[in-house]
Amino acid sequence: AEKCIRGAAQTLFAGNIRFGAGDLFLQFADVIAQFLHTERVQQGDGPIDAAFWAVEKITGIKLTCKEFRVSSASLGRDAIGEVTLEVEHEGHSYRGMGASTDSVEATILAILNSVNRIITEKSLRSANKVSPQDA
């Protein structure tokens, strides 16, 4: 299912997200982001690590995870997990949030939310630059 990322300009969308973990097969994340129609399958130490790598490879935006929190937004077997994270990119900190009944999917949505914030800020900065002819 396609998930829309909110809280920043909607540049990246999570399309089909597949991930797996366990002793019997490789841990991976297959993140299909509608960003230049790119799909990336990455391996990592787990599906969350692999998701970070996949998003970095798709967008070319290097991320350092500084904070990662998972909490329950509802109760019951089908509880919604909320992920809040803080990433650093080029010396600036960005927050991302995601929610899903699957904590790995919520993490991927939070990563994409933070990347959308980065893309939005970069666009605003470049739009506000004054060219030498305008000075």
Image (tube, grey):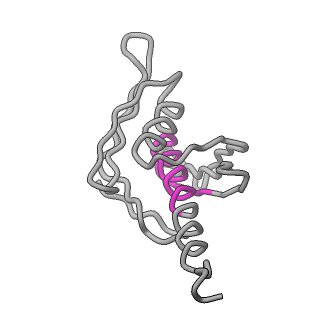
Residue 49 picture location, percent across and down: 53, 31
Would you place residue 75 above or below residue 7 in this image? above
Give the main secondary structure of the magenta stretch. Answer: helix
- Give the extent of the magenta segment: 96-116
Residue 77 picture location, percent across and down: 49, 43
Seen from the viewer's position, the closer of residues 5 and 106 is 5
Q: In the rendered structure, does residue 94 fall within the stretch colored magenta?
A: no
Q: Can you name the residue that lies furthest to the bottom here?
A: 134
Seen from the viewer's position, the closer of residues 24 and 87 is 87
Q: Can you name the residue that lies furthest to the top here?
A: 24
Would you place residue 85 above or below residue 129 in this image? above
Residue 27 picture location, percent across and down: 43, 22
Q: Image quadrant for the C terminus?
A: bottom right
Side of 70 where 47 appears, left or right? left
Seen from the viewer's position, the closer of residues 97 and 119 is 119
Residue drawn at the location 56% of the way across and 72% of the way down: 126
Q: Can you name the residue that lies furthest to the front here?
A: 133
Q: Image quadrant for the N terminus?
A: bottom left
Seen from the viewer's position, the closer of residues 117 and 59 is 59
Side of 11 where 134 appears, left or right? right
- Answer with the quarter of the image where residue 65 lies: top right
Number of numbered discs present? 0
Would you place residue 28 above or below residue 76 in this image? above
Residue drawn at the location 54% of the way across and 78% of the way down: 127
Residue 3 picture location, percent across and down: 37, 59
Residue drawn at the location 68% of the way across and 45% of the way down: 69
